[in-house]
Image: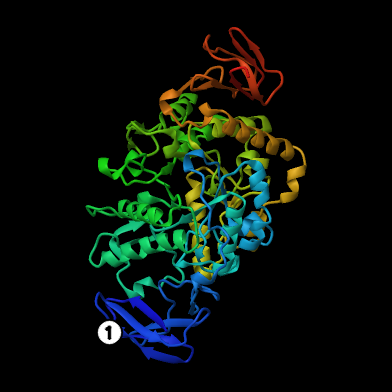
Amino acid sequence: MTLFRVWAPRAHSVALSLGDEQMPMSLDEGSWWSADLPGARDGQDYAFCVDDGAPLPDPRSPWQPNGVHAPSRLVDHASFPWTDASWQPRALSSAVIYELHVGTFTARGTFESAIARLDHLVDLGVTHVEVMPVAEFPGVRGWGYDGVDLFAPHHAYGGPVGFKRLVDACHARGLAVLLDVVYNHLGPVGNYLGRFGPYFTTRYGTPWGEAVNFDGRDSDEVRRFVIDNARMWLADYHVDGLRVDAVHAIVDTSAMPLLEELAAEVRALEAHLGRRLSLIAESDLNDPRVVQHPAVGGFGFDAQWNEDFHHALHVALTGEQMGYYADFKTLGDLAAALSCGFVYDGRRSQHRGRRHGRPATGLGGHAFVGCLQNHDQVGNRARGDRISQLVSPPCLKIGAALTLTAPFVPMLFQGEEWGASTPFIYFTDHEDVELGRAVHEGRRREFAAFGWDPADIPDPQAVDTFERSKLDWDEIGRAPHAEILEWHRQLIRLRGREPDLSDGRLDRVRATADERDRWLVMERGPSITIACNLGGRPARVPLAAARPRERLLSSDSDVVISDDGLLMPAESVVVLGAPR
């Protein structure tokens, strides 16, 4: 016997829909409706009818095999033959994260096809695979941030079984899995939650649609909905951690904020499962409380994305100054990010027109995820161009070196390791033509603020926009991609070999920069020095007298090491350490 339950506090009646038949459901305590169905089993399709309305998918649907508007399907999670009983992920502090989008990671764009490329990640030195959102969204192609069935892995990727096979395959190769989840809003198409209850509120708003009701009347069950979703991915799908999208867009005035409650429940689940679990936040707040312990007023997350580091590094390499990049004008900003975590720690932001952030006092580097590229910073460009399309290969090597020797947890975006030439463009598959047109026009207006020509912005709805965003794996063996790939492998091996590169201690990082001659030096502990010449001409770079001078890795063999410093060719980087 299977018990069907759904929360619908405002409904006068709810019926369980099974094909052409309907079964009235009983109202239980707490505004939950229930019905027992003898003989229901894995694969049974069903839906709910609220107040004699049309059948709707279950708000907690485990599978939407025919898309967001179709009936839900039961899934027996206990039936999957997992092979990872002894699995234990590496600590996040020792991670090298690789962000991927299932639909563009391979030509077929499925969970199953991604498995064939996992050995490449192992060979690269990756430890954690971060998967962009897989919750059911409208259509067959999209980034996943407009998901509407949060408990159902996307049908076009391979559904629940496909995702479990990918996770199990990752674990078999020693790769942890982090899943990107979106709790600040839901997509506009196929979003039926409001028909069941007060999941949303008009008291707040988000840039993407209605805000979720986390602190108003009847919000207890809404919070439970989100926390149960997080627990499902971690327990039923064996995911090792979650990256929570745009936590700054979650408005919650409760004494116990949702994020803190989520972290507490994940810690409890971790103790129960006996498996290490991680929480990473995307936050635009520059607020250390996101990762501080609840005992001192924090939310208790393990790490947060460090956008200041990305922006400062991007500007240092490209010189771009539009939009939010206007706040990161000097190499001194990059030095500040490397040594302090946040650049904007209470400083006034030109872009925001106000002071922003607070100091990351007491935090270590492992509380931050640092990257040169991610899906946002590539995909939210007009043409989805990667850093490899914006700078020379030598500059690309500098960016990789600073990302992989920084005191933060490093993250690569799919294809970055070989300087992929394929773009990553924003793409959608909205069946509503007017919605698709509105999305396209909205992006045109948004990008106008960055000075991009609206005519250069691809149509997100066009199939070609999606197809062009797929990785070309044949590039790996060709120049200059093979050389860039080997450079990343060497950097990751070096990071794993040198304790000073992985200790995460910001108090042992010293970064200095010269704006005129365009060089930057970062000292990691007592034994490692990273020196970069970002300028277009050779530069003499001074070094502290007591620093080790053995060359560990260099992008250019013409770097000259002397007693009084370095003579560095244009656009070059060298990592120095103690003699072995």
Instruction: Count all numbered tags in the image, as a single digit.
Output: 1
Which quarter of the image is occupied by the C terminus? Answer: top right
Residue 225 lies left or right of residue 394; in this view the side is: left
Q: Of helix, strand and loop, which one carries label 1?
A: loop
Q: In the image, is residue 189 above or below residue 302?
A: below
Q: Residue at x 41, y 60 (%)?
A: 231
Residue 483, image quadrant? top right
- In the picture as drawn, the residue positioned furthest to the right comes out as 478
Q: Which of the pair 236/539 is nearer the observer?
A: 236
Task: Estimate how packed mark 1 is, as few (under 14), some (14 to 19) or many (20 or more) residues with alpha carbons within 10 Å.
Answer: few
Q: Horizontal and vertical percent for residue 92?
A: 48, 43
Residue 417, image quadrant? top right
Q: Which residue is mark 1?
A: 12
Q: Residue at x 27, y 64 (%)?
A: 219
Residue type at mark 1: give it: His
Q: In the image, is residue 404 above or below residue 548?
A: below
Q: Residue at x 61, y 45 (%)?
A: 385
- In the picture as drawn, the residue positioned furthest to the top comes out as 563
Q: Horizontal and vertical percent for residue 59?
A: 40, 72
Residue 573, image quadrant? top right
Residue 531 lies left or right of residue 490; in this view the side is: left
Q: Which of the pair 567/297 is nearer the observer?
A: 297
Q: Residue at x 36, y 42 (%)?
A: 291
